[in-house]
Amino acid sequence: MSKLYQLTYRTTGLEDWVSRFYSRIGITNPNSISEERISRFLGIYVKKKPIPSSFHVIGRYQDIVIDSREPIEKHREIFFHELCHILRHSGVQTIMPASFRELQEWDAHHFTQYAAIPYHMIKYIPINDRDVIKQMTDMFLVSPELCEERLEQIIRRNQIQRSIY
């Protein structure tokens, strides 16, 4: 068993929320992560158009627009980013203070990491493999940059927790 699995790593509240949500809608492995399943469960329409990505909430109507000009491996990341804004944020970013907007963007970035590569699915990641990033990219259908950032985050948090105990 990899050292990474012998962790004292503590998940964040947001990581726990993503895992519970995925469990509730039957997402149990990387192959079952599906924008369609998630959006259908939440009643959110998803559209791909050659316009900047965005989300809209008008009464009970909710949609996510994914910029179809973006590389395909970015579409899932864009979906999760915009989904976070629908689920966790309020207000109009164009008129809110910059620091509040930055906080929402920081939160959406972390949500994207956790939703795209949930902690409870790291057992599927071949941590010790030379091509781990490529395998994660293929497995989770996101960019190599996101995979590398998430893997480094998991390893870094494990090291911090081990140094505390």
Image: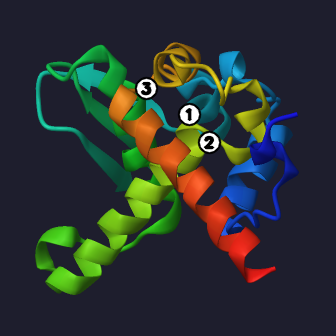
Whether residues under marks 2 and 1 lie with C-beta atoms below 8 angstroms apart, the answer is yes
Picture layout, residue 33 above or below residue 93: above
Image x and y of residue 78, in percent: 34, 37
Picture layout, residue 20 above or below residue 116: below
* Residue type highlighted by circle 1: Ser
Find the distance from the CA under tag 2 to the CA under tag 1.
Answer: 5 Å
Find the distance from the CA under tag 3 to the CA under tag 2.
Answer: 22 Å
The C terminus appears in which quarter of the rendering?
bottom right
Q: Please give the residue where the numbered disc 3 appears in the rendered image.
A: 142
* Residue type highlighted by circle 3: Val
Q: In the rendering, which numbered label is found on residue 3?
A: none
Q: In the rendering, which numbered label is found on residue 39?
A: 1
Q: Please give the residue where the numbered disc 2 appears in the rendered image.
A: 42
Q: N-terminal of the two: label 1 or label 3?
A: 1
The part of the image, by quadrant, that contains residue 68 is: top left
Q: Is residue 47 left or right of residue 114?
A: left
